[in-house]
Image (tube, rainbow, N blue to C red):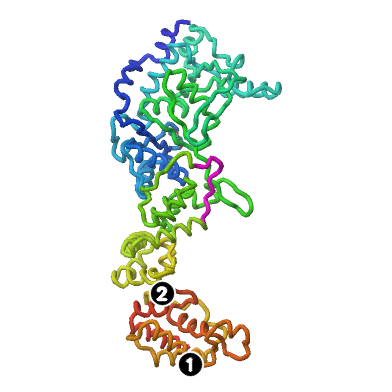
């Protein structure tokens, strides 16, 4: 076969040579050991936790080594393309503090290794496809769906391996004339790789997370270019990551099964393989069993979920870091206030069995992060969140900035600070009692107190209430009321001899608590009263006493 003739037949248009591309995209001039990483999301409009998880790894590896982190849009599948999806990818990543050094942006490209959208790289792929044809490593295949299905049925009947290989690869040995005739005839074709692999051979691949893997060599004549001339993921990934000089390909473990194809291509093209880093799939506990996070069942898979619930991005990255690196929590315990970027992330500390995403644990981490976040910052974030998701509350919450910051600050200092806040939608609910517009009695008054007793407690409390008291003096007065009205000053005593008392002191404070906060669980009443101010405190109590 005259491969030059075949290449000219398949690629009649002028194309640059591989050498020219090597010159346009030279080896990057970076310090020794610098890592070049990327994410390659498809613009389907759905951006999920896995994307962020992989982005975080790539971003950390490159930032820590003085390398480059870029965004490549993998839009070769036009059926899945959703208008505005690039914007969604960029804004979601930005929201979580992930910034790219180069890559696709909303209005064009930033960087000299582009285009960063695969749909604009067709000619580049064709140059290298042509190169493979020239060396006899690629050939056109005209087999249609029906033929492939018939082949599959035959393979099934013979209990043989499925696929396009060996003697099954019918189009491998078409003559130039046959090919030319079919093309002239307008028959559609794909371009296949001519694999010299053997199903009995193993190939070793080093994975940055999993170590050295031994995989079955690829022996299938896989597709390089589809019938519309658009490359498959396999081919596009190899060409792009070579020319963009990616050193570490961080991607999900769903690509492990086709890894032999990718290394075969790298090797055949004579290119240095990148270090592959296949991340474990994100799992969750569903009852007793672990399963993959699912788009259909688990809203927390979508990054949108975190925005809507108002989780601070810092909470999400902090939690992802605990999942990513087994030593992160220990580091955090030793460095409670250090910025997260001070942590040295390493691939070695990553687990390669399913990464467990635990919402309850995530909430605990979020509570910790919010406790470290200054009240002023929480105020800004909650205002920002409410402006978008609850405009009514936004008005109420931002009417008096100082008041709201004081409300947020309650209970957050001292030896045993409270961790009341988890995310902004929960913070809205939690803080709602501070505002007249959202205050309501949500919980029941203690069962041990009837209406008369409640009135009695509240009226005595109002009589003795003095806003000049400090916390100790204030509480001493509550004790006097409890004692006078027959409530045990220690819950233990009441438990032991319930018949001797009307209840315990916690019933008394809970009467005041429900009157003032509307709930049986709240931060310290004295502190809350200081924020509410004397008038509002008295008004709420008086109102409750009318009950
Ligand atoms: N477009 C691929 C995906 O969305 C990217 C895989 C890769 O990073 O190479 O899964």
Relative to 16, say whether 233 is above or below: below
Nearest the viewer among 432 and 76 is: 432
Q: Earlier in the sequence, mark 1 or mark 2?
A: 2
Q: CA distance from mark 1 to mark 2?
A: 24 Å
Q: Position of residue 254 (x, y in %)?
A: 53, 36
Q: Find residue 538 and name its label.
A: none
x 45%, y 82%: residue:
515
- In the rendered structure, does residue 357 fall within the stretch colored magenta? yes
Q: Residues within 10 Å of mark 1 (few under 14, many from 20)?
A: some
Q: Which residue is mark 2?
A: 433
- In the rendered structure, does residue 51 fall within the stretch colored magenta? no
Ligand 1, image quadrant it occupies: top left
- Mark 2 falls on what kind of element? helix
x 43%, y 37%: residue:
42
In this rendering, which labeled residue sits more in front, label 1 or label 2?
1
Q: Which residue is mark 1?
A: 456
Q: Is residue 413 left or right of residue 295?
A: left
x 52%, y 42%: residue:
351
Relative to 217, say whether 386 is above or below: below
> Among all residues in the image, which is located at the extreme front?
334
Work out whether residue 188 can be spotted. Answer: no
Residue contact at pointers 1 and 2, CB within 8 angstroms:
no
Q: Give the extent of the magenta segment.
A: 350-359
- Mark 1 falls on what kind of element? helix
Q: Is residue 151 left or right of residue 36?
A: right
Q: Position of residue 360 (x, y in %)?
A: 52, 58
Relative to 236, say whether 71 is above or below: below
């Amino acid at each position: 076969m005259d491969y030059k003739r075949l290449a000219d037949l398949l690629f009649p248009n002028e194309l640059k040579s591989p050498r020219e591309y090597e010159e346009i995209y030279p080896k990057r001039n970076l310090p020794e050991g610098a890592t070049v990483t990327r994410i390659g999301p498809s613009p389907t409009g759905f951006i999920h936790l896995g994307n962020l998880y992989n982005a975080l790894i790539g971003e950390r590896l490159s930032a820590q080594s003085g390398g480059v982190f870029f965004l490549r849009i993998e839009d070769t599948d036009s059926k899945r393309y959703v208008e505005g999806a690039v914007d969604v990818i960029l804004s979601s990543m930005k929201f979580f503090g992930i910034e790219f050094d180069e890559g696709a942006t909303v209005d064009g490209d930033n960087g000299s290794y582009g285009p960063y959208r695969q749909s604009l790289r067709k000619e580049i792929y064709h140059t290298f496809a042509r190169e493979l044809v020239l060396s006899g490593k690629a050939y056109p295949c005209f087999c249609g769906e029906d033929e492939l299905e018939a082949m599959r049925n035959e393979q099934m009947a013979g209990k043989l391996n499925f696929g396009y290989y060996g003697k099954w690869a019918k189009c491998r040995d078409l003559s130039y004339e046959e090919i030319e005739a079919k093309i002239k005839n307008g028959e559609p074709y794909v371009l296949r790789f001519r694999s010299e692999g053997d199903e009995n051979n193993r190939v070793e691949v080093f994975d940055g997370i999993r170590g050295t893997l031994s995989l079955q060599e690829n022996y299938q004549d896989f597709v390089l270019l589809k019938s519309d001339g658009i490359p498959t993921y396999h081919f596009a990934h190899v060409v792009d990551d070579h020319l963009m000089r990616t050193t570490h390909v961080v991607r999900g473990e769903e690509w492990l099964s086709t890894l032999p194809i990718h290394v075969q291509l790298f090797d055949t093209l004579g290119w240095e393989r990148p270090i592959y880093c296949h991340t474990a799939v994100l799992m969750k506990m569903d009852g007793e069993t672990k399963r993959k996070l699912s788009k259909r069942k688990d809203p927390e898979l979508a990054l949108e979920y975190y925005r809507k619930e108002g989780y601070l991005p810092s909470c999400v990255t902090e939690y992802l870091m605990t999942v990513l690196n087994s030593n992160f929590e220990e580091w955090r315990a030793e460095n409670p206030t250090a910025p997260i970027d001070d942590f040295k992330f390493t691939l070695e500390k990553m687990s390669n069995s399913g990464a467990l995403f635990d919402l309850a644990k995530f909430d605990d981490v979020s509570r910790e992060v919010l406790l470290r976040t200054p009240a002023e910052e929480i105020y800004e974030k909650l205002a920002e969140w409410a402006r978008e998701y609850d405009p009514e509350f936004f008005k109420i919450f931002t009417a008096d900035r100082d008041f709201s910051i004081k409300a947020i600050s309650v209970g957050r200092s001292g030896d045993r600070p409270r961790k009341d806040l988890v995310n902004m939608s929960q913070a809205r609910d939690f803080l709602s009692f501070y505002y007249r517009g959202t205050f309501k009695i949500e919980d029941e008054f203690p069962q041990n107190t009837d209406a008369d007793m409640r009135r009695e407690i509240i009226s005595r409390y109002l009589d003795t209430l003095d806003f000049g008291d400090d916390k100790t003096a204030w509480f001493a007065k509550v004790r006097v009321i409890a004692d006078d009205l027959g409530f045990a000053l220690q819950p233990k005593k009441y438990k032991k001899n319930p018949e001797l008392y009307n209840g315990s002191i916690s019933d008394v404070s809970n009467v005041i608590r429900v009157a003032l906060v509307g709930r049986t669980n709240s931060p310290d009443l004295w502190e809350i009263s200081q924020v509410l101010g004397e008038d509002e405190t008295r008004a709420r109590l008086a109102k409750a006493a009318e009950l």
